[in-house]
Every structure is written in structure tokens, then in C-alpha cells.
Image (cartoon, grey):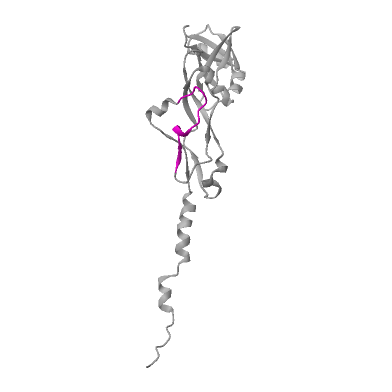
Amino acid sequence: MSLEVSAKSRTVQGKGASRRLRSAGVVPGILYGGTASAQSIELEHKALWFQLKSEKFHASILTMDLDGQKQQVLLRDVQIHPWRQLIQHVDFQRVAQDREVTMRVPLHFVKADQAQAVKFGGAIVTHIMNEIEVACLPKFLPEFIAVDLSQITVGHSVHMSDLQLPEGVRLPGLARGDSPVASASIPRGAAEEDKAAPAAAAPAAGDKKDEKKEPEKKK
């Protein structure tokens, strides 16, 4: 079921008008894309603020109820005040079901605890990416991409080409190179301890000269 966001057409324009809207608990925004022209909109701040806390809201096809008319949209940009909990502006893009969309979706890292490198090797898995750009028709847009870490080994990485993609989804970024998504390595401190252990176990070179030799028997 599609998430729904409510909006109204906005007639007032300009910075002063936008400040007054924000003071009244309303967020100014814009809706663009498709065959229609760009349209100024406004949304209720409190409702939008809580919706933005959902990861799914950022990477899903949304149903926008605009003045009673429903249409499919994507959240494209959100401007937040630097230190106040205040949404300053929001952008939405209209979606056509027969046109491919490009979207950044979150990565969900799974099965790290099953990796031999982690269970027995003491490795730490580093997440190099937290989200990834996908391209697909709207009906195929995934909420997230799962990254299976069960086979990762020490000193190696999971790359973009290793990801299992849902039906109809591709990664435009592969055209620019097969970037790593996650890697496994031994923490530096643990690696240094492992190197020091054999040296500590070996006898010191000076110990040999302290050994007593048996006197040679005279013939």
C-alpha cells in the first residue's frame, strides 16, 4: 500500500510569504515533472515532520492528495533548518508509470554474524555505502537493497556487482566502476597483538650464552 501525503495548492509567493507560512506551521514546496507545469504547494509541518522520520517515505512511490486529486510522486529534496526542527522547503516529482525513475535507496546489511571472518577471525565489517542509486520503472522501485555479508572474507570487499537486485532494477553507478559497498578487516590493535605473540614466545638470543657447557673429557 502506497504511503500518502496531503498537500494544497499555494498561491502566495516570495520569501516573505514563505516565512509567514512557516510561522503558521506550514511548509512551502513545489511539485514538478511529467507533462504538467511546476506547481507551488504547501503541506502541514507536523504531519510531514513525522513522515520524514520513516526511511520508507524517502525511497517509495508516494500518493499525493493535492486538493482532492491523487497522483503518484517521489520525494526529491528536503531543506531543514541548520539547528531548528523546521522544514524550510520540500520538492516532489510527479511519476509516470511507463517512465524509468532514478532514486537513491538505503542499503540493509544482513548476515554479518554468519561470516567466518567475523565469527572466528575477529574481523570488523565496515559499511562503505549506506545507500545506492537505482533505476527502474516505478512499479519495481525497492524500499531498500539487501547486502548479504555471510561470505565476506578478511581483506576483501562486497562490490556493487555482488548485490542481488530485485526484478527490473539496475545500478547506473556500475557504468562508472564497480565500487565497494562493504569490507572486512582485522582491527589494527588486534593485528599488532597477533604479530607480537610469536616474538614473545621465541627464546631471546642472549639466553643461549648463559647455558652451561659440560666440560670436555680428556682422552
For the question of whether residue 82 can be seen, the reply is no
By secondary structure, the bulk of the magenta-drawn segment is best described as loop
Q: Whole-percent x and y of residue 59?
A: 53, 23
User: Viewer-proximal residue, 7 or 213?
Assistant: 213
- Which part of the image, by quadrant, shows the C terminus? bottom left
The N terminus: image quadrant? top right
Residue 102 pos. (x, y %) = 46, 20
As rendered, which of 184 and 21 lies closer to the eye?
Answer: 184
Rendered view: 94 above or below 193: above
On whether residue 196 falls in the magenta region, the answer is no
Q: Count the marks: how many? A: 0
Q: Position of residue 166 (x, y in %)?
A: 52, 26
Between 152 and 27, the one nearer to me in the picture:
152
Residue 185 position in % (x across, y down): 47, 46
Task: Give me the residue at 54% from left, 50% from top.
Answer: 120
Task: Give the quarter of the image for residue 84.
Answer: top right
Residue drawn at x 51%, y 45% is 124
Q: Is residue 127 above or below residue 134?
A: below
In the figure, 40 relative to 116: above or below? above
Is residue 120 in sight in this rendering? yes
* 103, above or below 17, in the image: below
Report the span colored magenta: 156-170
Q: Is residue 160 magenta?
A: yes
